[in-house]
Amino acid sequence: MEITTKEITEYSFCPKLYFFKNSFKLTPSLEEYYNDTLHRLMHRFLFMARDGEVSAKELKMIWASSAIVQRRKSKFAYYSPATWKSSISEFNKKGVAAINFLLNTYPSLLGSVIAINEPYRVILSKDIEIAGKWDLIQENKGTKEIELIIFKEHDKLAHVPPTQDYKAVIDTLAFREKFNITEGATVLQSFNSEKKISAKIGSPHIKEAIDSVKNIHKAVTSGISFKYPSYRCKSCSAKLICRMNGVNGQQKA
């Protein structure tokens, strides 16, 4: 069975929320839509930068069309009406900041582009196959080393160490298999600042992630959910819906 890196990271963040979203087909939160739009914006920018024709107008149109779609939605599953206006305002501010950063700063950080938003597959066993996408693979201008770049918001770079970040580790595993190398630079890069974290992800980190993915795959395929109370629950945008009974007869959080 195929499982995606997005499913793995969503489940690891909160198994209960993962099953809520998939069982009840919840509307994505504004934050999720923002992250998806930001990735789409970055990928389009990279394609234009590679071809030497960066269009500020096109980038702004991508963001504007996303904002219009959001205004047309009558509600969000994770947001109350009271927070909607401030949320869409923040959505637009972040878009402007990201576009300005890309236009004014990022071109100088760009090396020789090898792959952009390229899909990959990793076969863990006869029953488990992981599907994902690399954000960017490039050759570093200075060191000439091939780098795997993963984009995140600047204030989320240090939330989880790169060696424990499922996307970073699995992307690195696929990266090494593709290029037949044992070591390579994995870089978590901010969308809208020069902040970044470089990591050397080794075999022990990959083995640990693979073991966890196998457990997640088993839980997802069997439909098992369980309580997941933690410090993250306080700031979770879905905490209101989490007050209902959990999936498959589980107890309230």
Image: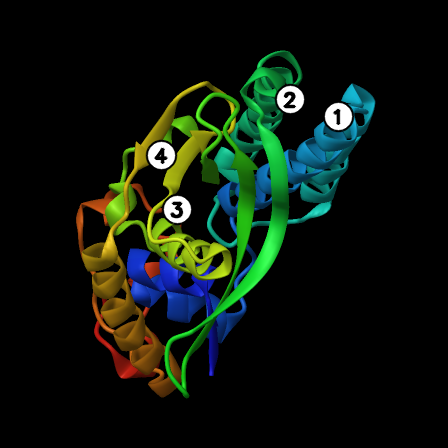
Residue 157 coordinates in the image, percent (x, y): 34, 33
Residue occupied by mark 1: 60
Q: CA distance from mark 2 to mark 3?
A: 26 Å
- Residue 6 higher or lower than 186, as above or below: below
Asked whether the beta carbons under mark 1 and mark 4 sit within 8 Å of each other, the answer is: no
Residue picked out by circle 2: 99
13 vs 240, nearest the viewer? 13
Query: Which residue type does callout 3 highlight?
Result: Ser
Amino acid type, label 4: Lys
x and y percentages locating residue 207 in the rendered image: 23, 65
Measure the C-alpha gap from mark 4 to mark 3. Answer: 16 Å
Q: How many residues crowd around disc 4 within 10 Å: few (fewer than 14), some, or many (20 or more)?
A: few
Determine which of the numbered discs, if any, sits on residue 131 in the image.
none
Q: Residue at x 54, y 20 (%)?
A: 109
Q: Earlier in the sequence, mark 1 or mark 3?
A: 1
Q: Secondary structure at mark 4?
A: helix
Find out whether the residues at labels 2 and 3 contact each other: C-beta distance under 8 Å.
no
Q: Residue at x 33, y 60 (%)?
A: 242
Residue under numbered circle 3 = 237
Amino acid on which the number 2 mark rests in the picture: Ile
Q: Mark 1 or mark 4, which has the lower sequence index? A: 1
Give the tally of numbered discs.
4
Q: Are dots 1 and 2 in contact, CB under 8 Å?
A: yes
